[in-house]
Each structure stands twice: as structure tokens, then as C-alpha cells.
């Protein structure tokens, strides 16, 4: 079973439908115990980091997320859920993230924001399991104004160019994160979610 974390900031049903389409059993939940006992966990998200962290804290979900990751269960952060994995964001001045991965989140400057629409991924690590069967320069769907800057370049799975080359996905052990929306990325996105489901 894949637990989809509901903290009030995400297109949960779209993520659920996409996962179910590739054969996954899913549950949208705010229950820390359900999250901890799931086989895999997805942290989706749309919006700003500060209110997202406040909601995760209020719901008591941060220890459950840490528990899942420490136990080595596959964990996928999507869009804001990806950014939340890092230490800090410049959004709202300075906001602490979950600090699971080292690095920060910054705003695009001198570019039209948000970046909305299709863009290509450049694969930097061909061994990343959720990218199995994904071709170089595949198009995926983005909607974001902030991007992550990992402290350790070894975690970078793909980059994308939007005025600058930015990190569009990461992988470290059982932790995966994508800046784009696989649930909106048609065949490519479904393949990524299928790969995650089959881990």
C-alpha cells in the first residue's frame, strides 16, 4: 500500500488516480500510524513552504515521515513535497524545511514565474530506479517558482533548463524527489510512478 500524505496542500486525487492507473493500492491519509505502516509513501504538494511545514507540524506528521525514511521505505516527494525535503527555503524570508536532504530552495530571478508547462529533463544518473525506461530529454509538466539547490551534487538525478540549469529530480538511497508533476506528465509521468510502485 502506498500512503499519500494529506496535509491540505496538494492535488491528492490526481496523484492517487495516476498511481492506481499503474496498479498501485493507495490511501490518502493524515494518520501518522497509517503512514508509518505503509509500504511506500508519497508527499505531494502545491503552494508555499512555510504553511506546508506548519500543517505538517500541526498534524504531527513530521516524526512519521522521519520514521518511514529511516526504515528505508521508498519515499517520493512531488513538487512542493520535493522542496520540503531540503533544509531551508528563501520563501517568506527564510523557512526551515524537513532537512532530510542537505541544501536549500531559492526563487527564480529575472525569469517569468511560475514556470508553467512542459519542459525537458536531462538525465544525470542513469542508475536511478524511478527513471528506468525514461529517455533523455523527455518532456514532463512543471508548475513552480522556486527550485532546489542540493548541497551534494551526487543526489541529482535530472536537471532542466529554464534560463538556468536547475535540479528537477533527486535520488538518495530510498528517497526520491521530483520538481515536476508526474501525475500530469502523461506517459512519461505514469512510467515514473509505475517504477516507484514496483520498487
Image (cartoon, rainbow, N blue to C red):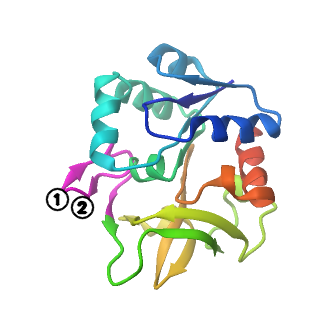
Magenta span: chief secondary structure: loop
Residue in the image at 33% along x and 84% along y: 110
Position of 107 relative to 72 (above/below): below
Residue in the image at 70% along x and 58% along y: 185
Is the Cβ of the residue at disc 1 closer than 8 Å to that at disc 2? Answer: yes
Position of 96 relative to 113 (above/below): above
On the rendered structure, is 180 left or right of 140? Answer: left
Question: Is residue 132 among the parts visible in the rendering?
Answer: no
Position of 181 relative to 27 (above/below): below
Mark 1 sits on what residue? 93
Which class describes the residues within 10 Å of circle 1: few (<14), some (14-19), or many (20+)? Answer: few
On the rendered structure, is 171 left or right of 50? Answer: right
Secondary element type, mark 2: loop
Along the viewing direction, whichever of 192 and 180 lies nearer the viewer? 180
Magenta part of the chain: 86-105
Q: In the rendered structure, does residue 39 fall within the stretch colored magenta?
A: no
Expressed as whole percent of the image width and height from the top left, the position of residue 165 reads 48, 80
Q: Which quarter of the rendered picture does the C terminus lie within? A: top right
Mark 2 sits on what residue? 90
Q: Which quarter of the rendered picture does the N terminus lie within? A: top right
Q: In the rendered structure, does residue 97 fall within the stretch colored magenta?
A: yes
Residue in the image at 50% along x and 80% along y: 162
Amino acid at each position: 500500500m502506498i500512503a499519500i500524505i494529506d496535509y491540505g496542500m496538494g492535488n491528492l486525487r490526481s496523484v492517487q488516480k495516476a498511481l492506481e492507473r499503474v496498479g498501485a493500492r493507495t490511501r490518502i491519509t493524515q494518520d501518522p500510524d497509517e503512514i508509518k505502516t505503509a509500504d511506500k509513501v508519497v508527499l505531494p504538494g502545491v503552494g508555499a513552504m512555510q504553511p506546508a511545514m506548519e500543517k505538517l507540524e500541526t498534524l504531527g506528521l513530521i516524526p512519521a515521515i522521519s520514521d518511514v525514511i529511516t526504515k528505508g521505505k521508498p519515499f517520493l516527494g512531488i513538487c512542493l513535497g520535493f522542496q520540503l525535503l531540503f533544509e531551508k527555503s528563501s520563501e517568506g524570508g527564510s523557512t526551515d524545511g524537513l532537512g532530510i536532504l542537505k541544501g536549500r530552495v531559492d526563487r527564480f530571478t529575472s525569469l517569468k514565474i511560475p514556470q508553467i508547462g512542459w519542459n525537458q529533463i536531462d538525465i544525470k544518473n542513469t542508475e536511478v530506479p524511478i527513471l528506468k525506461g525514461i529517455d533523455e530529454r523527455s518532456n514532463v509538466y512543471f508548475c513552480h517558482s522556486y527550485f532546489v539547490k542540493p548541497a551534494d551534487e551526487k543526489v541529482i538525478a535530472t536537471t532542466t533548463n529554464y534560463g538556468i540549469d536547475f535540479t528537477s529530480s533527486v535520488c538518495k538511497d530510498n528517497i526520491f524527489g521530483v520538481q515536476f508533476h508526474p501525475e500530469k506528465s502523461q506517459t512519461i509521468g505514469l512510467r515514473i510512478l509505475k517504477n516507484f510502485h514496483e520498487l
